[in-house]
Amino acid sequence: MTAGNKSNKDEVRTGVYICQCGTNIAGTVDVAEVAEYASQLDSVVVAQVYRFMCSEPGQEMIKKDIKELGLNRVVVASCSPTMHEPTFRKVCEQAGLNRHLFQMANIREHCSWVTEDHEKATEKAKALVRAAVRRVFFHEPLEVREVPVNSSTLVVGGGIAGIQAALQIANSRHKVYLVEREPSIGGHMIQLDKTFPTLDCSACILTPNMSELGSHPYVELLTYSEVEEVSGYVGNFKAKIRKKARYVDEEKCTGCGVCQEKCPWKVTSEFEMGLGQRKVIYTPFPQAVPNVPVIDRENCIYFQKGKCRACEKFCEIGAINFDDEEKLIEVEVGNIILATGFQTFDPSVAAQYGYGKFDDIITGLEFERLCNATGPTGGNIQLKDGSVPRSVAVVHCVGSRDEEFHDYCSRVCCMYALKHSHLIKEKTDAQVYQIFTDIRCFGKDYEDFYERLVGEGANFVRGKVQQVASANGKGMDRGKLTITAEDPDNGKVTQVFADMVVLCTAIEPQQDADKVAHIFTVSLKADGFLLERHPKLDPVATRTDGIYVVGCCQGPKDIPDTVSQASAAAAKVLAVITKGKVELEASTAVIDEDLCSGCRICNLLCPYSAISFDDEKKVSNINEALCKGCGTCVAACPSGAITHRHFTSEEIMAEIEGVLV
């Protein structure tokens, strides 16, 4: 039954409001004609036009009509519901009308912005308004539910993004659990030598924050740990965290370092990017937080052969515990911030760069360790044979802006390539060649940094690298390697000879990003990064309420943008905590147990794990606190037992009929 032939039309009194949106709508759509048409539709008692319906006078117009004309349904035809549906729902509530007795028609993006034909735009606007009027006829008031919010927060990832977010929340005297899979917090930033464009010492900036976090009374630091499972909903999440065995008692250990000094076994250091070694019992770097070593079980001779235990013998306080076992910790939190970071592109899969084939071809992150004072060479930039390079080629866009690998720009490569030039010039007399396709210096003071580098004498060669190979005796006075690059505009080929090649590799999503997305019920973008709710209007929230994404797990970005995004997520979390309660989605699915056949198809398909099976009744049940109203179960139910509140078949069919009549 449609709105036009329902028996008692007096029960529904609808007000229709057409927005001119300046000339955004009125420049193409005849809004007066649409309003006149709407006034003749069944159940409509008033139809008005206003220049900006979202403005205060426009909102007051709706409130006044609801009270004076007894409206119990409202339709606004204007712009995208994503932008202003919450605005007009709030207007209805302020006038005493349930927010779900409102319907919005998008006649800007769907009409005026998609055609220049005034007549067709006007006719389509009429159809959309007619559909909205017919649909809202069947709307029912829904109850808005609120639940209390747990004031604790889970931050996943201990790089600069996680540290910043955790400190912002903890400094407001709210509990934070910070989970980091490595033995220490710090992330990639602690591996860097200096940061662009100010050339501040990276460790000097970061370690004070690391220390503050490690000793903060409102922070529980769970390093060498990973989140295994998350359940619940916004305000009331439960997380299971697996804390791996360190084989060193964190409470007893003083960080004296004797155990590491006495350990006779060495392996390649991950922190030094394979350029140096570490002991089998180790802290990743001197400023590690917590400053407690961990035993590498896979390489420890005791665990392999039952011998040694030198670290235990020399530990005077008895902090070594070979019987240590991993623990499963459960925490309850109200909000979750994902700051799981990034990995760098492996250039060995791109044969043209010669990485792994020739000596002295290194990545940008390996170069950071090479020129860092705490690195394997004590900060001396040198070749594998120990000599100082006479020439260095810095290659841009390795894995970025490349259709074969990643078509996106990694945003930091140009600037850290320029920074490398400065460090090379500062520490050696080498000639520096910047081999690039485009230079992108987009941030604050970045262009000035570029001009500075030009003044320092760096050589800029425009071209896409086609091959890096051994010089084979050619140009040995200028370098051991030859880099062939082709200008993408004119095809001009240039050859550069260098002793060392630094590859500025792309920022990639973490290898387990899909696993993270599954655990936390968030989405991935096509490029593999975690998906935000809206790229402009809500860049840190996700589609799962109460879960936020910050830093490079959301997309490539530099340190200032990462810190800003982490602070933004912390502010959102604190706003929820301060409010003390959160609204749950009212437009959820509900199961009619009399119709449910117990097939469990909905249980398997629900992306939010909101549906469980009652073994006693042999029917499925929906946890409305977990349900996000996506409608997947409604579409899949073969017996039609599931109804979606606010998207009932009656409402949808009325809307379709309204468009097609």
Image (cartoon, rainbow, N blue to C red):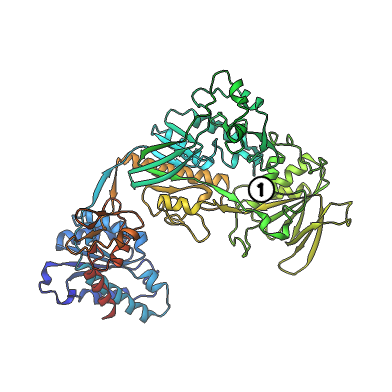
**Residue beneath the point at 41% across and 44% down:** 336
Query: In this rendering, would 130 be left or right of 375?
Result: left
| Percent coordinates x, y for residue 93 in the rendering | 22, 54
Q: Is residue 47 visible?
A: no
Q: Give the residue at mark 1.
A: 416
Q: Report the amino acid beneath label 1.
A: Tyr
Q: In which quarter of the image is the C terminus?
A: bottom left
**Count the marks: how many?**
1
Q: Is residue 533 above or below residue 240?
A: below
Q: In the image shown, does 419 or 232 lie closer to the viewer?
A: 232
| Percent coordinates x, y for residue 348 in the rendering | 68, 55
Q: Residue furthest top?
A: 316
Q: Is residue 111 above or below residue 520?
A: below
Q: Is residue 325 visible?
A: yes
Q: Is residue 201 above or below residue 228?
A: above
Q: In which quarter of the image is residue 58?
A: bottom left
